[in-house]
Amino acid sequence: MLQIQDLSKTYADGTQALRKLSLEAGRGLFGLLGPNGAGKSSLLRTIATLQSADSGTLLFDDIDVQQEPQRLRAQLGYLPQEFGVYPHLSCWALLEHIAVLKGLHQAGPRREQINQLLALTNLSNVASKTVAQFSGGMRQRFGIAQALLGNPKLLILDEPSAGLDPQERAQLHNVLCEISRDRLVLLSSHIVDDIEQLCPNVAILLQGEIVLQGDTQDLISPLSGQIWQAYGADIDLPPQAQLLQRSYQRGIPLQRVFAQECPGADFSPVAATLQDRYFLALAKQEATQ
Amino acid sequence: MTLWPLLLNEWRFCRVQPLFWLSVVLALAFAALVNLNPGTIDAQPVKALLLRHSMLLMTIQPLLIGVLAPLLLLRDSQHGVGALIEVTAQSRRQRLVVRALGLWLCAALLQLFFVLFVALLFSTTYADATGIWRWSWQLWLVQQLPALALLTALTLWSSCRSQSPIVLYLQGAAVWLGYMLLAAATGSPLMANSQSLSPLLSQLMVYLDPYALTPVLAQLRQNGEMPAGLSQLDINFWLNRLLIVTLTALLCWRALQCNPVASSQRQPHATTDITQTTAALQYQPCPPQQLRLAPVFAALLRLQLQQLCLQYGTLLAMLALCLLVFSEVYTGLGYAEAFSQLVPQSRDALNRVSHDVIPRFGLLLAAFWAHQLSWLNRQQRIDSLVAATPQPAALLLLSQFVVLSGLVLLLVLLSLAAVALAQMLLQVPLDLAEYGRQGLLIWLPLWVWTVLLLACHALLGQPLWANLAAAVLLAFGLSPLPDLLQLQHPLWRIGQSQLQLPDSLWGYQGALGCTAQSFAGDVYHGGFWPYLWFWALLAISLGTLALQFYHRGTGFSRPKLVAALTPLTAVTAICAVLALLQGLHIHQQLDAAGALQSRDERLAKRAAYEQQYQHWRAVPQPVVQQVTLQAHLDPHQQQAKIRATLTLHNPHAQPISQLLLSFPGLQTPTALQQLQSGQAVAANIDNNLGQQVFSVQLDPGASTTLQLQYLLQQQGITPAPSHQIIRPEFSYLRLLQLLPQIGFVPELRLRDDAERVRFGLAPLPASEAQPSVLAASHTPASARYDWAFLDITIAVPLGYQGIAAGALLKSWQADGQQFFHYRTEAPVRNLPALIAVPWQKQSSAAAGVPLEIHSPQFNTATDLTMQAMQHTVQWFSANIGAYPGDALRLVMMPDIGPTGYALPQLVLINHRVGLRAKPTADAPFSQVYRRAAHEVAHQWFGHGIGNGVAGDSAFLVESVTKYTELVLLEQQFGRAAMQGLVDFEQQRFARAQAGSLAAASSLIDAEESYDQYSRATLVFARLRAELGDEVIVAALRQLWQQHRYPLPPASAMDFVRALQAHSPASQLPLINQLLLGTDIRPLLDEE
């Protein structure tokens, strides 16, 4: 569905946000992973027609997005990383306004979908309240609702689970899995677990470039049997071991490393995750610099 | 916690804010512009310094505080860091004090820059540099800092009451506008042509003027001189400062007592009460329908209107505008002048606000709304959501155009409603057609502005740049910036036309072109439509460009520039080309009308004329003996064809071989001059300065004739020159600017010393420029009357009256025209004029002189005017001398500036004050009567004697006629009426001289109008009281008998000598003091 070839974007201050980036994504959920400043939001904004690329091609089905942005917008649902709302407008009124902008002109179906989305995002009870007074989580759910308005073939969600409580997050996962059957959902998140749980395909973006891309399981499988973890803070690592993550479990320091062989007596093998793959990519990037 | 580190912290914050530095640059640029006035040297530098400081304070201080206050006082709530700051160890009061102090210090520092800048300019211009620097520091300390403290305290108090920056912006605007209105209402010299409306208000301002200008002016009014230092300022000044400081302290105390207001970021709702019941729900898509623009457009309009109209700022601004309009109309409707009121109409009510208050306020609001609309989505951070919807960018922008146009229309309608309400409360009938016309003429330019402003915001991706562009446009459209930069072309005044206020005599004929019957006027020749077309085409061109390259509200989602011809690009290109053509058309028309010449260019020409032609003063030249004119006036076509024959006579003992003709006006003859026994010297035709030299052979006592033909075609693209008007309702041509003048004309020389030096000329010696020296012992030998017989035939359309000086010898009809033949029986001052009006006349006579009034209607005012004409002619005939003419004709004129004007045997009176006005209930005298008497008196003093002495002052013209006003008012209406005039002129004089920067001069040498009129009234009132009328009249009679044509002309000093001759010796010191002295305190002490 989405084909990106050699996409580059440099901002006026000289920041190279995208460097000859290429990407292909088909129907379903597609995850974008990357640290802050990697270019995820720039890529999503470019796909969402909000800014133009300096060079490269961007195709969605038969649409050349750069040449015909209006055609893409007609089948786009977009949730930016940060957004605001108009003051004085109720949740229902603002959803209706955006629905009209999205081309839902027939009042009946429009009303029906708004009600359904309000229920889907747990906002029915506060539909008449002013959106500007919503809490962060409620506002995020409103954002998801507005992105789902209409029948978007391409859904771009930039950090959709930010601010959601675990129950809301689970609910979001249900919705995303369901809607991604017949459309492309581009999902950007810092929470690697979300991507791993939801996305069969994933790309890791570092400094404006895709450093890894493919089937999520295929990316994780090569690490199988090479991920080790040990409790304790002062554990010496052999040179061939690559520290992936220092964290805590119930307050006890925990180290997770990548090594072909067991790095020490304190270490025990664990199952590889997407997070391990992500940290390994980051470590490699740092090493090359 | 000590104060200093906290203040340093404020500075560290300010110094990295672009807005702070932008304010610094703009404020300094404005200060520089205000002081950009090359060649001006004021006679009273300290007073000039005080006024310059006050002007800068009035214009910059409220705006500076308005811009900086939200930055310093509201930064926590604006940037969402309130929670972080409020939990620091600093108390709220400490925080407020530090920030208010920071604001005060920042603004004080900026004002110090202005003070240094102005002081530097003044100290390099004037000799007393030490005094200038001393006064500058003192003014900064006692005038500026307390005013700044009060404004800061007020802002602090407001910021404690509301966390909205809009409130502070509006407060800044209200203080800015409010002080200007107060200054205008109290007759401050900062506001041109203002006058005191209420003594109570003026007295209050003495104590409460934050800039302390009013108490200084009040002191100046009492003793006439600027105090030498701060210590000499009177108790009122210090009381004023004390009150301002007390008020500041009170406001600060109240601000610190205020409870903190809730942040504008409201508390979010709790989410725990929401039931999680959606696990089983499924997403059901709703496919969008085919793109339909109408519902989307309606939704956009609805939302944007709602967002703008629900803002407190919008509501407050609308309310403020309505109140301002209502108060302006309600309090001022019917005001004609002091002691005189109109019977008002809708046009008068609308005129009070339709050319300044509504367009200017409306434009500022439109600029504010344009910003709000353009960046609404971005400010609310919803721009990405909206920009990602499938609606065309053009549709989004078009909705903004429509919303803003609608809001501006609403603003105009509300303003008109406020006018109508005031009118109804005053029981003045409504003329809805006039409301429609003026409403349209206000709305159309505002609509053009809305397109221009929105186009700026749509084409520029950053709000800062877009607002800067809008500010530059507004500065050129609203402020006197083009004048300050000496940009003369009217098209530099962005979005402005040459529309003039309509009056009840000729409606819109001053500006809308020649077609009186049509409301729209002539599209191509009027002073409104050509400009509107130009700006509208330009705006549409930019608007359509914006439709193609709109950033969709994000600032960065702009489509790439492609070289493709679309219908919109075609419209852009066509409109741009049409705008260019229209601009060129306007330029050509203005050039042809001579409206593009700047003041400096005119002065340079006069200087060049003096340098190149002053040697002609010694060359004998003929005099004009007779002027014969045959004029065909076609008011509907705005056209005049004139054939002139000048009979030139050689009065000298030697023959004349060369003749210099000056054509000072722009209109040169269409046909070559035919001069009997003469021919033009080809090498000496100077088209630039309008001079031509002829070779002639004119023996002593011989005469010759010069024939000229003129074709005048007027257009309304620029306001008609005040003495050359050809319009259907009123046509008036004074031929002074048309007919050539013979020889070198000394009156064309520059008189101001600074200007003469600037253009390379030596200052005129006192013996040529100062009347008391010029004729100290006798009238100068160069004095000569320029008088001639006038023989004038005027052809006008049927139904019109042709009017000129002289006896009407014959009137007849031929070729569908009415002819009038006038001829003076004796020579008169060579100032021929033609008038054509479609009105009837009222006739009378006094002392054997036929009197006529030509007016569109006759009422009690015209009856009073006729009485004034009769009384004046009778008094002069009985006391001074017989009327020097054949008949006297008074004609009402439109509201084009002067209230009255006299020509030989003709008088023009502004219909607004002469026909439509009546005395107010408390009027001690009738202005209608006074003005008519004054203008009629000019037939003796002005056009009888008082001319012919180059370099003499206006004393014999304007000052002496003030004496006749006093005599006639007392004679006809009693002593109280006369005393009323004296009291009125005393107030006017005290106010005018307090604000004047001119050097003190004697009444005989006076060049300021307040001296020539008001001071003269006081002087003559004193002379009447001390010497009596008999002595003064005897002196005037002697002057008339010894100096009337063809005897040698009189100078002002001849009157002094005559008065001294008729007065007892004991009164000579008084006469010398009043007429030749410069001390005005004796006149002010009588207040």
Image (spheres, coloured by chain):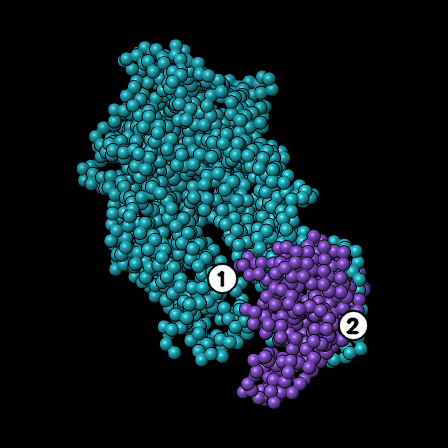
Q: Is residue A82 visible?
A: no
| Crowd tier of the residue under label 2, counting other residues whose Cα lies within 10 Å: few below 14, some 14–19, many 20 or above | some
CA gap, disc 2 and disc 1: 55 Å
Taking the image as shown, residue B828 lies to the left or right of residue B1081, namely: right
Crowding at mark 1 (Cα within 10 Å: few <14, some 14-19, many 20+): many
Q: Which residue is mark 2?
A: A178
Q: Residue at x 77, y 66 (%)?
A: A27
Chain appearing in purple on the rendered image: A
Q: Is residue B461 above or below residue B528?
A: below
- The residue at which mark 1 appears reads as B171
Q: Out of B770 and A73, give the one closest to the viewer.
A: A73
Q: Amino acid at mark 1?
A: Gln
The colour applied to the residues of chain B in this rendering is: cyan
Q: What residue sits 40% from the left and 73% below the top? A: B6
Instruction: Name the secondary structure under disc 1.
Output: helix
Q: What is the chain identity of the residue bearing mark 2?
A: A
In the image as oriented, which residue stretches furthest toward the left?
B1065
Of A174 and B840, nearer the camera is A174
Q: Quadrant of residue A1?
A: bottom right
Percent x, y for residue B958? 35, 36
Q: Nearer the viewer, residue B776 or B247?
A: B247
